[in-house]
Amino acid sequence: MMTLDFEEPIIEIEKQISSLKERDSSDQYAEEIAQLQQTRDRVIQKTYASLSPWQTVRVARHPERPQTVDYVRMICRDFCELHGDRHFGDDPAILCGFARIGAMKVLVVGHNKGRTTAEKIACHFGCAHPEGYRKALTKMRLAEKFGLPIVTFVDTPGAYPGLGSEQRGQAEAVAMNLREMSRLRTPIVSIVIGEGGSGGALGIGVGDRVAMLEHAWYSVISPEGCAAILWKEANEKTNELAARSLCLTARDNLSNGLIDDILDEPVGGSHRDPAGSARTIETWVIDQLGELARLNPETLIRRRFDKFRKIGAVTSRALPAPTES
């Protein structure tokens, strides 16, 4: 498993455990191994309980962190993928398909980053083109037609910024999704499972319920992009400053009213226990869809509209009149 620099103390302990296990043929070191394992678990818990915002971003980008395709495999049954936007073509950076989660039939939409180098290049590292967002909207309208709820998995550094995507209407495609998702007459739940970058995330992130995994990030821009704009240079120092200023962690987003829930990850992050993270997401999705299923379409749309209209609302209070001295 690839490791991060702040995990070095954990790796050293794991190396000691592995070394003892290789020499242990008769449980001679069983007690010492058990003590080292307890120490490792404590260090992991302490390290991940005090991650800085920039460290959180790096955990969210861990190459072994579960992606949309992994959660589809672990959570969904009878998944049937759907392709094409009926305008230009298919975009592998957006995954769409009908499936079952628990006893519910749903439409699943999510960003697809790819795992191998070839897959990453084919999927544009999870940065969708306009046809990806148009594909997602086309399938969402199909779900609305059949009365199926929608589950979206957000995991992208942002929408693809290339010349071709701009020529084909990238901004219009994202804006169209924002408008149309806000008035779909079917329940929508969204989970930020890794990166939630700018309009690329919002393009499939307008939901009745929005949650983030504990070590995901969600912001108007990446720390590197922010650092390049404000300090004209992106390095460890400026990236850390930008990450703190952006308030991009799950805790920050919850306190700012941008999300509804934080989903706890297994100790040490989802990449250490993908199945445990999948169980948490599955339980949350089933619970939320069960609650939303009781609402009629008009109520859904009204509440969804009100929810997003409240984001960023500021109230002012008149200052008391000055008293004469």
Image (spheres, grey):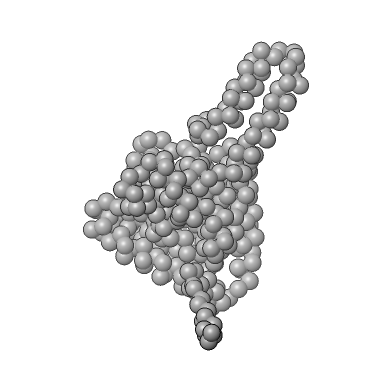
Residue 285 drawn above or below residue 306:
above
Q: Position of residue 310 (x, y in %)?
A: 51, 72
State the residue at coordinates (73%, 25%).
Answer: 34
Residue 82 drawn above or below residue 236:
below
Image quadrant assignment for residue 84:
bottom left
Q: Nearer the viewer, residue 231 or 260?
A: 231
Q: Position of residue 179 (x, y in %)?
A: 40, 70
State the residue at coordinates (64%, 39%).
Answer: 46
* The furthest residue to the front: 325
Residue 290 drawn above or below residue 67:
below
Q: Nearer the viewer, residue 16 or 1?
A: 16
State the residue at coordinates (39%, 59%).
Answer: 199
Q: Position of residue 223 (x, y in %)?
A: 41, 49
Q: Position of residue 251 (x, y in %)?
A: 57, 55
Q: Nearer the viewer, residue 139 or 203?
A: 203
State the residue at coordinates (66%, 17%).
Answer: 20
Residue 178 drawn above or below residue 102:
below
Q: Is residue 297 visible?
A: no
* The furthest residue to the bottom: 324
Q: How many marks?
A: 0
Q: Is residue 34 visible?
A: yes
Drawn side of residue 171 relative to residue 21, left or right = left
